[in-house]
Structures are given as C-alpha cells and as structure tokens.
Image (spheres, helix red, strand yellow):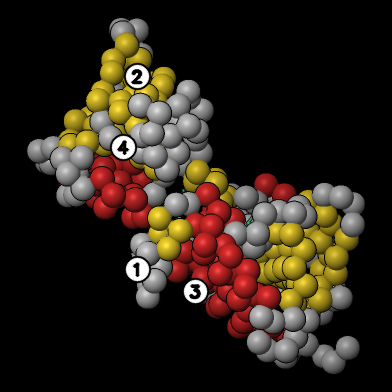
Amino acid sequence: PFDVLVVGGGPAGAAAAIYTARKGIRTGILAERFGGQVADTMGIENLVSVPHTEGPKLVADLERHVREYDVDIMNLQRADKLIPAPEGGLHELVLENGASLKARTVILSTGARWRQMGVPGEDTYRNKGVAYCPHCDGPLFKGKRVAVIGGGNSGVEAAIDLAGLVAHVTLIEYDTALRADAVLQRKLHSLPNVTVVTSALTTEVHGDGDKVTALSYRDRTHGTMHRVELEGIFVQIGLVPNTEWLAGAIALSPRGEIEVDDRGHTSQPGIFAAGDATTVPFKQIVIAMGAGSTAALAAFDHLIRLPAE
Ligand code: FAD
C-alpha cells in the first residue's frame, strides 16, 4: 500500500506529492489528466515569482518537479469510489477501470470545473476573449469592453472588479433580478461604467475567427434579440467541484465542496483534501499549491502517530 495516495494531478496534487515524497514515504499520484485546469490555461501572470508562464509549460514544469522524486504517477486514471478505513486501517480507492488501490492516508485534490454557457462560439473563443477567471484574465482587457454572465455573488464581484480596469462592463443575468448580496448590488449600481441587463439569455458568442467581437442575448420578457459589441466575456455561472464520486464517503458542503479545516483534514481521519475541490475560499494556483503542501504535512503528521505496520 501507499503511505500517501494523492488523487488529482493539478497544482494542489503536484505540491502534495512533492512534499510527501520529500519525507521519504511511499507516494502515489493518480490523475485523470495530469495538470488539471492549468492545462486549459494560456497566459499565467500571478504565479508569484514567475511573472509570465503558459499553462502547458507550467504543466510540464509541475510534472518535471514531481518526477525528481520517487513518486508513482498514474496518469489517465479516474477514481470512482473512496472507501474510508476504520481508524488506522487502509483506505481503498476504486478506479473506473475496476482496479483498486490501498493507502494509509489519502489526499483528495480533484479540483473543479467552470460551468459553461453551452452556446455556439463559447468553445471556439475560449482564451480568445471568453474567460472564466477575473483575477487571472481581467488585466488582459484593460480599457476594453466586456460582459459578465451571471448575477450571483461571483458575477457581481467580477463586474465590480472589472469595472476598475476595463472601459465598460455589461452584466447579464438570466433571472428577473440579480441574486448577489444587497451590499454588492448597491456597489455595482454606483459604478458609472456598468450596465445591468436582467431576464436575458445569452445565445451566441461572435468572433472574427481570432477573437471575440460581440455576444447575442435574447430578452426573455419581450422575446427580442440583442447584440453587444465587446472584446471579452467572463462566464460566472458557477464553479463545480469534481467531487460527485465522494458523496457519502466524506462530508461535502451544500455546494459539493469537500469540507476541510485549516490543515486540510476532512471529516474522515487519514483523509485530507486541498485545492479547488474544497471549501477553501479562493480558487487560484498559488492557493492550491499552498493547500496541497499543507495537506501533505498534515498527512505526514497523521502517519507518524500511527502504530508501526
Ligand atoms: P485542478 O487544476 O482542477 O486539478 C484537478 C486534478 O484532478 C486534475 O488532474 C484532474 O484530472 C484530476 N481529477 C478530477 N477528478 C478526478 C477523478 N475522479 N479521479 C482522478 N483524477 C481526477 N489560477 C491562477 O492562479 N492564475 C491563472 O492565471 C489562472 N487562469 C485560469 C484559466 C482557466 C481557463 C482556468 C479554467 C483556471 C484558471 N486558474 C488560474 C485557476 C487554477 O487553474 C485553479 O485554481 C487550479 O488549477 C486548482 O488546482 P487544483 O489542483 O485544486 O485542481
């Protein structure tokens, strides 16, 4: 069995594996796709001490760093079920292919995925104007026109954040009213360069082949179609944690995030979690790396307290 089995090969999982391997304990890392969301990212400019990198390059760097150590990398393998052990026993991880792995501790770092609009043009122009992370990509749209899709807290926060950087923000909400906290809505309505459109369904992302040029939406009250010329679209309709397979095994929040404390402990002794899949308040690469390191050190703390095998 593994001393530590890391499930997920994004920044959180890679950091966790490096930290545990450096303790000289048997470490495995299982990933459906090594690199995680970073593999889908173009420019990254907020990885502290690295002023600019690109997703694929960071994935290669993460993998090279993990391979410096004796880590068993199991890529392109999907975990299907976790069976937590009674105190001190071995946890079992059942894979989609039917195989099963055993480990004294498990670190869950299966990340999350942005909910997509599912309209024509969204895929074509992803990273070419269609963006999901205002902290990451906001500065690329300095002085330009953008839309934010979604009027919940994250959409309204994104609109307020972007309004300070870009020329104009159009916030588009499907419902008849915004769902964000009143204090955020008040702040939003006080900004001169924001237009709020409610009861609107985005129907298409338009572009010139290279980049986004406009979006279309349907006014759900009158059935009329509208077109907004712009350079960027931030989709803020939810970040979904990749934790469906963990329901029943460990405690999840109402949003499906793995509940963790400040050391990455989950509700089950010996099972830890880190990164975007958890209740950690902000979802970013440096934060996921820090959380992965924390979970690894907490797993090590747990292991040295177990009776010898
Ligand atoms: P992830 O990166 O999501 O990795 C999850 C891992 O788990 C993957 O290896 C996945 O294959 C694996 N996995 C999932 N389910 C299973 C399963 N059942 N079995 C086995 N493996 C599984 N952040 C920044 O700080 N700066 C940026 O510029 C930036 N830009 C971004 C741009 C885009 C387009 C996106 C989508 C995100 C961006 N982010 C950025 C956010 C950042 O990528 C995430 O915060 C970070 O990747 C989270 O790391 P993680 O390890 O928790 O999860």
Q: Amino acid at mark 1?
A: Pro
| In the displayed structure image, the side of residue 182 where residue 269 appears, left or right | right
Q: Which type of secondary structure does the marked residue at label 3 adopt?
A: helix
Name the outermost residue toward the front: 209
Residue kind at label 2, given as amino acid type: Tyr
Q: Which callout, 4 or 3, points at the residue further toward the start of the chain?
A: 4
Q: Residue 206, how many percent across, how many down?
A: 37, 24
Residue 79 drawn at (x, y percent): 76, 55
Give residue 73's quadrant in the image: bottom right
The residue wearing badge 2 is: 217
Residue located beneath label 3 in the image: 290
**Mark 4 near mark 3, Cβ–Cβ under 8 Å?**
no
Q: Mark number for residue 144?
A: none
Q: Earlier in the sequence, mark 2 or mark 1?
A: 1
Q: Earlier in the sequence, mark 4 or mark 2?
A: 2
Instruction: Provide the residue designation for mark 4.
Output: 232
Closer to the observer: label 1 or label 4? Answer: 1
Report which residue position mark 1 lands on.
51
Q: From mark 3 to mark 2, how far is it between C-alphas?
A: 40 Å
